[in-house]
Image (cartoon, rainbow, N blue to C red):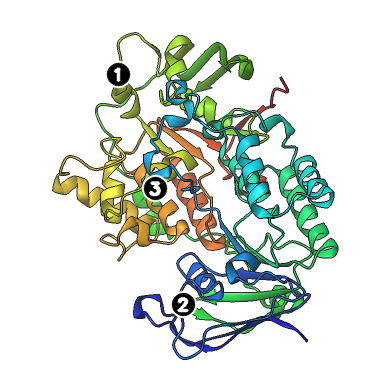
Amino acid sequence: MQKIISIQNGVTRMPEWRMAEPVNFEACDGEHIAIVGPNGGGKSMFVDILVGRHPLLMHDPDYDFSPSTKPLVSDNIKYITFRDTYGGDNDRTYFLQQRWNQLEIDENTPIVKDKLEEAYQMAGEDTPERRQLQEHIYELFHMHHLLDKYTILLSSGELRKFKLASTLFSEPRVLIMDNPFIGLDADTRDQLKELLKSLTTEHHLQIILVLSKSDDIPEFITHVVEVKDMKVYPKLTKEEYLAQRNPIPAHVLCEELKQAIINLPYSDREYHSQEVVKMNKVRIQYGERIILNDLDWTVNNGERWALSGQNGAGKSTLLSLVCADNPQSYACDIALFGNPRGSGESIWDIKKHIGYVSPELHRSYQRDMPAIRIVASGLTDSVGLYVKPKEKDMDQCRFWMKVFGLEGLEDRGFLKLSSGEQRLVLLARAFVKDPELLILDEPLHGLDNRNRRLVKDIIEAFCKRKNKTMIMVTHYKEELPACIDHSIFLKRHTK
């Protein structure tokens, strides 16, 4: 059988890139593989070895990409990472409020159609067959309404569609995708699975998925490779793996830490208002594009809301209004903790009482500062840490890092953590100041099964405290904690 990729006793030249044991792996023609394992277990490092990013001692991976005639490994293997830093030529200039700040858009800001056409032209010769594939991808992903949109305005789910489409134009022999389904609504997840399945049958395409959610393995996957403790385990058939997979525990957070959260002391500077969020006829529009249309919404003290809707329906925009990250929030009839927006409070007065995590926040962390300093930045609501915290504040940071299973990583650089570990650090940042309002936008992005259960346990314990209100966004109903008691669904405007 043709071996597309083969590695025998692979050891990287650089010690910092080495797995705990030599890597043995082969992907054969017709096999579609899921790489699974816990956060920080070594999945991304293993993929870097597969694609030749980390050169090996003695003998590099063997590749046989036939019938492809493309000479370079980089032409035959395309690796899409969906870290929440979303990657882009201008990502280093990204700031948290940029997506909602129209003043940052000028005539040089690219639109989706132009960037996708550029990717299409670079990927190969313009033929009727390739144009047909391009149109096929647009239709399956319902992308036509995005084509005239500025790339800077795309939601996190829309960015994933954009990146997938531009990569699929190149028709690679092997397509490796890191957590492709997170951030996508249920319909789009199903569309993507169908598209990938059709591509495997219509083209000579091998698919390798890197999945944190091992209960999200698509039907077309034939084999599974588990990577944990920096070891690559033998390849199993999907049926063999599912038969021996450990069940997700009913609870992960220990009783001692649960009670410690519930019994945390309360601040004497808390808001105690009956109405935490009140919006009257809120309308958000960019040019002719309506995002929110005359929305009325009241969130009362102690309520726990699930906010859902299609990609691009305005969920993150709605939350940006609450957090005052959106400049249009001051033109809207919004009251927070009983105080009308624009009545004299500063953005920092508002943020003192809100704990917040989102894909946009994750993307804005570009510096490799120690993890505990990221957590401490939640005390001052800054992206960096510019004031030295008091020792009692650092103790609070250590407590929340322990709660989120991050003990021992306090001094590790943020960019050296796995994307799942980064998300846990940002969650600890959201909880560290014991906020009255908790806003969690896709909080379980990239987390493995155990850590998803852990975070749900933490949320449920936190919401047992008095004077706590929560709004949570997720595209997976099973990710909602048991304490959810209200829901709102946003529909995308078609014009």
Label of residue 230 in the image = 2
Label of residue 360 in the image = none
Q: Position of residue 206 (x, y in %)?
A: 72, 69
- In the drawing, does residue 323 fall left or right of residue 145? left
Query: Which element is circle 3 on?
Result: helix
Residue 260 visible? The answer is yes
Q: Position of residue 234 (x, y in %)?
A: 62, 84
Residue at image coords 30%, 26%: 270
CA gap between label 1 and label 2 equals: 47 Å
CA gap between label 3 and label 1 equals: 23 Å
Q: Which residue is mark 3?
A: 426
Q: Which marked residue is nearer to the observer: mark 2 or mark 3?
A: 2
Label whose residue precedes the other's in the sequence (3 or 1): 1
Q: Amino acid at mark 2?
A: Met
Is 55 situated above or below 445? below
355 or 39: nearer the viewer: 39
Query: Which element is circle 2 on?
Result: loop
Residue 274 visible? The answer is no
Q: Position of residue 169 (x, y in %)?
A: 70, 52
Q: Where's the C terminus, which quadrant?
A: top right
The quadrant in which residue 4 appears is bottom right
Residue at image coords 57%, 45%: 481
Is 292 situated above or below 412? above
Label of residue 346 in the image = 1
Q: Classify mark 3: residues with Cα within 10 Å, few (<14), some (14-19) or many (20+).
A: many
Q: Amino acid at mark 3?
A: Leu
Residue at image coords 50%, 53%: 83
Q: Position of residue 200 (x, y in %)?
A: 80, 64
